[in-house]
Amino acid sequence: MLLSLQPRGEASRAMLWFSPLLAALLTLLSGALLFALLGHPPLETLKVLLVDPLGDLYGVSELLVKALPILLCALGLAVVYNARIWNIGAEGQLLIGALAGSALAVNIIDWDSRWALVLTLLLGTLGGAAWAGLCAWLKTAFNANEILTSIMLNYIALNLLLFAVHGPLKDPEGFNFPESAMFGDATRLPELIEGLRVHGGFYFALLALVVVWVLLQKSFLGFQIKVLGLDKRAAGFVGFRDKKLVWIALLISGGLAGLAGVAEVTGPIGQLVPQVSPGYGYAAITVAFLGRLNPIGIVFASLLMALLYLGGENAQMAANLPQSITQLFQGMVLFFLLACDVLILYRPRLKLWARKPQLVSAKEGPAT
Amino acid sequence: MPESQTARLQLCGITKQYPGCLANDRIDLSIQPGEIHALLGENGAGKSTLMKIIYGVTQPDAGEIHWQGERVTMRDPAQARERGIGMVFQHFSLFETLSVAENIALALGAKAGTPKQLEPKIREVSQRYGMPLEPQRLVHSLSIGERQRVEIIRCLMQDIRLLILDEPTSVLTPQEADELFVTLRRLAAEGCSILFISHKLNEVRALCQSATVLRGGRVSGECIPAECSDLELARLMVGDAEGLEAEYPKSEGRAPFLRVERLSWHNADPFGVSLEEVDLEVRAGEIVGIAGVAGNGQDELLALLSGEQRLSAAQAMRIRFLGDDVAHLRPDARRRHGMAFVPAERLGHGAVPSMSLADNGLLTAYQQTGMVEQGLIRRGKVHAFAEQVIQRFAVKTPDAQTPAASLSGGNLQKFILGREILQQPKLLIAAHPTWGVDVGAAAAIHRALIELRDAGAAILVISEDLEELFQISDRIAALSDGRLSPQRATASTCPVEVGRWMAGQFDTSDAPVSTSAA
């Protein structure tokens, strides 16, 4: 018996939708198997991981709090990845966004105007965009590979942030903890619902979703970005300005990541701390691909990713499982999705008997 | 001689199914020792698949291969070579920075010896078959014809019994092709069988003793080419298509639209071609054809004309269109002036393979009114435009949402050309408009070009197919090593003269026409 793959000739539309469902099912099965082997009741543990976190309104609010930064970063990545520009630097752009916003916020703690928030958010967004702009400049001026430059800029961003909280932005009355002062109320994103942590960043995420969707699906700019990504020579043939497009795509991506960062510090956190992000910028890369670079798909993918973050925490407390359960499930989802995506272009065939090879060895030579 | 009774190669019922297409359907073919056998067929008829099966690149789903009477399976090309089968592909696989001997040594493997050891044998083989070639020369300094010799000599270094040539003359001037035929006849006289794949009927008739014609994956006929007319052969290849024998009236041309004056361009690529003082004029209502063997500056000239390669503003007057300097403008700006372009490569240059036909229509037509409004794409207009192209030019496709890559070469070319023509350009520049296109589609493309010309547009066609240029162009010139020959009315020149231009001899105005026109 032999399982073989046959090319379909063209992509299967049914599989495009079915593949994520199949991947989810396989992830659940493998997870259950893993829990059983570890001696936990599989179904109950899955429930602890994936259902219990959403048991009440507080859980839903926490889910959104985690999903918002991932969603913002991933939407930006969808734009650059459509241009086949591999920006791995959403994490760094997010941190710079948080840092730039905080630098302003701690200096205007006493302000009482709404402009304080507007300026802070704007500065954070610009900071993220500028950080991605560095990649764009290095790429267009020196043809430097953006994968390398954006990763390296992540480390620089993290160290800048650490420097800031240990030095210039450290709270003078903070007992020498590496944290900034708490921001003034005027620079805080308001809570959406009294008593829950979900905040005004929700509206920005909705706005970004609509803008990115229109950009990629409806606008001519998005069309140019896609053509550049799919076929550089065709883009040159019709005279699209490739350098300009690289700049635009990276600035959008960096700006959204910066907005995610500044929304974190002005939203749920309220001050600049070293752990602004538990790796949202990296998770967003997985999310962007899970969502197939499609804004709507990315919404679902980021909710799933946030659920895994929450569930991981819950599983630690309720089932005594290690925190790495989160990464394990993130990894499994991506792994199974990539594996199932093969079925979009290939059709599995089960051969029940092996055909006898009809071979005449070359050594027998030609008969004369 | 037992060999004369058994066929060198016999194929029985070879069938190969690819997803969505039956590439080979029960094909029978038999080649005798010392026979030059033609495999004729339009693109997509299954010639390449059959060759790959013979050479062991792919395996048939059904059918038998008999090699000198023995049933065999060709698992891979190495096995085919071991049996004495050699193949010269259309696109050469040579390392440009290495010498001839080094390239051959690499292909033959370590057992054959070092490049130094091979040199005497290379000289001997090249002399015996009348293909002069210096083993120590670097490949990048060789002409295309010489590179092909390297590939052929590589095959002849082994004990060869069957040589497969895939459209070998498509890269040669008529004179070079004649030289190649002398070599092939000598080789056949020594008992080597030759499988000659081509769609040029006059060559097949001149060279081959027998022919197998494929159509749509099946053998549509076997014949002796010398006893068949072009029309009979063409009918076997394409069935009853219109326009096979079409002759178009020549046109005079009116006001000059495009003027290229002393256009020189230095190519930074050491293996590329630089252009030298190119002078060219294309008038309204005429087709100017530029002949030439590939790699003589066609790509560079097209890039400069289309704006993919721009000159500085100081050099802008080198290319003038309707009185405006355009040499410094981007492609989109030139299109706004009324120029349109069809590049040589359909997929990956003229069209984005994975995008739909509708999107590929938008790709070059986006400056047409109404397609893009306030930065947003008007899907309805884009779709209607693509549908219009599909209908007007009889593009065979399920619908406008089909990705470009899934169309056959001919249909995609009809779409690309139609996309440009429907934008009503004043000047159309097309490179290799019928390259790799079946005869039926080629006739349709020619008719479309003639129609556009008669509507008053200026047309420049760059092509390697001399027959095509003589059929459709009103004036003709040739590129050789970055220089352009004088342009002459097609009616007052002949393929032999153009062949000399292609070889770089431009001062041949009074040379007698001795050999008959190809």
Image (spheres, grey):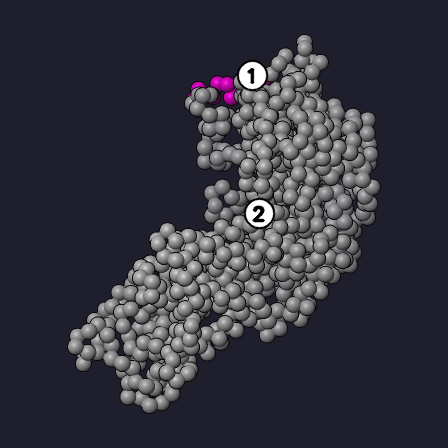
- Kind of element beneath mark 2: strand
**Image location of residue B110, percent across then percent down:** 44, 24
Give the residue drawn at x 55%, y 41%: A4
Left or right of B469 in this view: A324: left
Question: Which chain is indicated by disc 2?
Answer: A
x 17%, y 75%: residue: A176
Magenta residues, dominant SS class = helix
Decide if residue B461 is in sight here: no
Residue at screen point 79% across, 35% down: B236
Q: Is residue B87 left or right of residue A162?
A: right
Q: Is residue B83 magenta?
A: no
Q: Nearer the viewer, mark 2 or mark 1?
A: 2
Instruction: Write the start and end of the magenta stretch as one range.
Output: B116-128
Disc with the residue nearer the chain's start (2 vs 1): 2
Residue A334, percent from left and from top? 45, 56
Q: In terms of image quadrants, where is residue B162?
A: top right
Looking at the rendered structure, the kind of residue marked 2 is Tyr
Q: Which image quadrant is residue A46 in?
A: bottom left
- Mark 1 highlights which residue? A364
Task: Return the mark for residue A346.
Answer: 2
Secondary element under disc 1, as helix, strand or loop, is helix
Residue B121: say if magenta: yes
Compared to residue B75, the image places residue B463 above or below, namely below
